[in-house]
C-alpha cells in the first residue's frame, strides 16, 4: 500500500512525533522514508543610506557575506535535523533518504511530493489556534490542500 513516505522535519516536537509514526508505518509496509527539511533565507531588499546619512535605528543592514553566513548556518541546522532523523529511522531498520532544500516551505514540500510520486506524507501539526492559523497560514494546511496523495497529520 505505502512504498514511499515523505516526512517533513523542522526539528519541532510535532515533526519528531510524525517521524516516529512514519517509521512504524514504514516498518509495517516495508516502505522507504524520505525526510525533507526546507530552510529559507529571505532577505528583504535594503536601501543603503548615503555614506553621510546615519542608519535609522532598528534597520539592520546585512552584507552579502553576512547573508552567506546565515544561509550556511541554516543548512547546518537542516543537515543536523535530517541526520538525527536518518539515524533514528536506520536504528529501526527503515530505509531512508534525505532532502535538504531552500525555499518556501509549503511550495517545496508540494514540489517534492509531486515530483517524487509519494504514496503518503506524514507531517506534524503545530496545534496553533484557529485565528493565528488564518492570519499566518499553516504549512500542514497548505500541504494538505495541494497534494494528491494521502496526508497523515500527527498532533
Image (cartoon, rainbow, N blue to C red):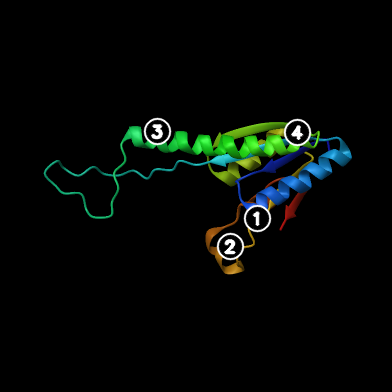
Instruction: Check whether the beta carbons of the residues at disc 3 and disc 1 lie within 8 A of each other.
Output: no
The circle on residue 68 is 3
Which residue carries the number 4 mark? 90
Q: Residue at x 40, y 33 (%)?
A: 68
Q: Residue 133 bears which disc, if any? A: 2
Q: Is residue 155 left or right of residue 55?
A: right
Q: Secondary structure at mark 1?
A: helix
Mark 1–mark 4 distance (CA, rounded to whole Å): 29 Å
**Label 1–label 4 contact, CB within 8 A:** no
Residue 151 percent coordinates (x, y): 75, 49
Q: Position of residue 119 (x, y in %)?
A: 79, 40
Residue 84: where, in percent of width, then height?
65, 38
Residue at (65% x, 55% y) in the render:
141
The residue closer to the viewer here, 149 or 68, is 68
**Residue closer to the observer: 147 or 100:** 100
Lower sequence index among marks 3 and 4? 3
Q: Is residue 136 above or below residue 9?
A: below
Q: Secondary structure at mark 3?
A: helix
* Measured Cα–Cα span from mark 3 to mark 1: 31 Å
User: Mark 2 or mark 4: which comes first in sequence?
Assistant: 4
Question: Which tag, 1 or 4, sits closer to the chain's start?
Answer: 4
User: Which residue matches tag 1?
Assistant: 141
Q: Nearer the viewer, mark 3 or mark 4?
A: 4
Of badges 2 and 4, the one in the foreground is 4
Disc 2 to disc 3, C-alpha distance:
31 Å
Label 2 vs label 1: CA separation?
Answer: 9 Å
Identify the element where label 4 is drawn: helix
Amino acid at each position: 500500500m505505502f512504498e514511499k513516505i515523505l516526512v517533513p522535519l523542522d526539528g519541532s516536537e510535532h515533526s519528531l512525533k510524525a517521524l516516529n509514526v512514519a517509521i512504524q508505518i514504514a516498518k509495517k509496509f516495508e516502505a522507504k522514508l524520505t525526510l525533507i527539511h526546507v530552510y529559507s533565507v529571505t532577505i528583504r531588499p535594503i536601501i543603503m543610506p548615503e555614506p553621510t546619512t546615519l542608519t535609522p535605528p532598528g534597520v539592520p543592514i546585512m552584507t552579502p557575506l553576512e547573508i552567506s553566513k546565515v544561509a550556511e548556518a541554516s543548512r547546518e541546522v537542516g543537515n543536523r535535523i535530517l541526520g538525527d532523523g536518518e539515524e533514528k529511522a536506520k536504528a529501526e531498520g527503515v530505509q531512508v533518504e534525505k532532502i535538504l532544500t531552500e525555499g518556501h516551505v509549503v511550495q517545496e514540500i508540494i514540489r517534492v511530493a509531486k515530483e517524487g510520486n509519494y504514496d503518503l506524507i506524514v507531517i506534524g501539526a503545530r496545534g496553533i489556534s484557529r485565528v493565528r492559523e488564518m492570519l499566518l497560514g499553516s504549512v500542514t494546511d497548505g500541504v494538505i490542500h495541494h497534494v494528491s496523495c494521502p496526508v497523515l497529520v500527527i498532533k
